[in-house]
Image (cartoon, rainbow, N blue to C red):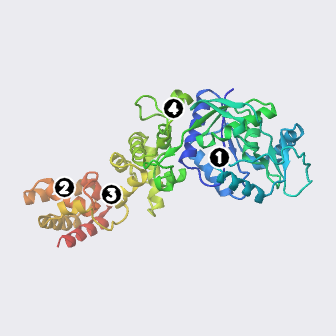
Amino acid sequence: MIRTRFAPSPTGYLHIGGARTALFSWLFSKKMGGDFVLRVEDTDRERSTDESVQAILQAMEWLQLDYDEGPFYQTHRFDRYEEVIQQLIDNDHAYYCSCSKERLESLRNEQMANKQKPRYDGCCRDKKLKSGELENMVVRFRNPQRGEVVFNDLVKGEITVSNNELDDLIIARSDGTPTYNLTVVVDDSDMNITHVVRGDDHVNNTPRQINIFKALGVSIPLFAHVPMILGEDGKRLSKRHGAVSVMQYLEEGYLPEALLNYLVRLGWSHGDQELFSVDEMQQLFSLEGINRAPSTFNPEKLSWINQQYLKTKALNDIVELVKQRLSKNGVTLDDDLDISSIVDLYRERVKTINELADSILYFFQDFEEYDPKAAKKAFKEAALQPLQLLHDKLSELDSWSTEEIHAVIQNITEELGVNMGKVGQPLRVAVTGGSFSPPIDQTVEKIGRESSLARIQRAIEYIK
């Protein structure tokens, strides 16, 4: 059975690159009817935090990247790593090393001065040191000195690395804790991982890990190294390019399915198709279809995709998200207030839930300023008379209903001998602050008597 895994380090939030790796791994397992495993690589005790673990789990849940097994935590498996390290020592595939930091630093400086690749020189390789014989000893893997490592990367093709380019890496620190290249091999073997999908910053680790797999005599998974994501300036993606926490996109009003759609197209394609349902992604995705070249993160494209999803997502779902956003903005909504028609009208014009909520905020609270273009066009001196008449006649209404409000507007246009735009548009800008809204009679009715009259008076003073 196909088994893939996503194995983040909880030293920060889940970012765009990590989310894309998780998505590709998840899609491949789903398509192949396999299992997707979540593993938390938290052996870096100084940098790993519970807060980061929770942020990763929340992001996976929001993106609906469900896992079949896990989360497994490496810090719960130290006994297993210790057992494997001892096995490698007993079988002469690893040895104790007593080289000091000072010696290693001096060696490194000398090699760099001679324009050599910095690497451990095997000083303790044949000393046969025993556990506890000296202080601060580490354990190093005895890497083969001859031959080469050849593996077929499912994205990059065949990769060959000579063993004499690899040094004897540390697999256990002086305090006994295991290092990444050891733990990842043990975990992938114990968890029967068949395919490792990860960022191509791990390509250099793969030959080292393959040699450890061989030394343990266990099955070696297939590897698919995904090219990195770049900013639009061609440099590695960072916070200034928009490489923020995945959960930040929730805060900014993006839909999870839109973000997944954007991520799947960030380095993978199916003809010219841009929009994919999750089912389509699972049916069409293949590791071989991943591009070999780096991808460029484009915030505008993400916003465009989000806009497409806003237009087509079930209206009730959009309304609920807008209500949540309005609540965060301090707006208290009556339970019986139906804002579906307002949301439906505005969702064609915005790119995020936040923009949608902001666009209809005028229904629930006063705005600070008018849209400059709308005010310049609608608030000419000629608008004073219709606005004053509107204020006077609306004040006299017994029933504050759409029908009554419509009748007032209609009567004023006839009284002044002007078209509806000369009355309706100044009124619209007066009560909403902008030039776009649902039908103006409905808008004024929903805003309410007190707020509508106060805003019309404010517009009159503004023009004067």
Q: Identify which residue, 196 or 191, lies in the foreground.
A: 196
Amino acid under disc 1 = Pro
At mark 4, the secondary structure is helix
Q: Secondary structure at mark 1?
A: loop
* Marks 3 and 4, the one that precedes in the sequence: 4
Which residue is under mark 2?
A: 407
**Alpha carbons under labels 4 and 1: distance apart:** 23 Å
Element under disc 2:
helix
Quadrant that contains the C terminus: bottom left
Residue 405 against residue 280 in the figure, above or below: below
Q: Which marked residue is nearer to the observer: mark 1 or mark 3?
A: 1
Amino acid at circle 2: Ala
**C-alpha separation, residue under disc 3 versus residue under disc 4:** 42 Å
In the image, residue 122 lies at what x, y percent? 79, 45
Label located before the other in sequence (4 or 1)? 1
Estimate the x, y position of residue 277 in percent, counting from the top left: 48, 34
Give the distance between the C-alpha atoms of the residues marked 1 and 2, in whole angstroms: 63 Å
Question: Image quadrant for the N terminus?
Answer: top right
Give the alpha-carbon distance from disc 2 to disc 4, as whole Å.
53 Å
Q: Tell whether 21 sits left or right of 168.
A: left
Name the residue that disc number 1 marks.
Answer: 8
Q: If you read the primary sequence from the N terminus, does the residue marked by circle 3 or circle 2 appear first?
A: 2
The alpha-carbon separation of the residues under discs 3 and 2 comes to: 16 Å
Quadrant position of residue 217: top right
Residue found at the far front of this picture: 114
The amino acid at mark 4 is Met
* Identity of the residue drawn at 24% across and 56% down: 435
Q: Nearer the observer, disc 3 or disc 2?
A: 3
For mark 4, what is the residue? 281
Question: In the drawing, does residue 303 fall left or right of residue 105?
Answer: left
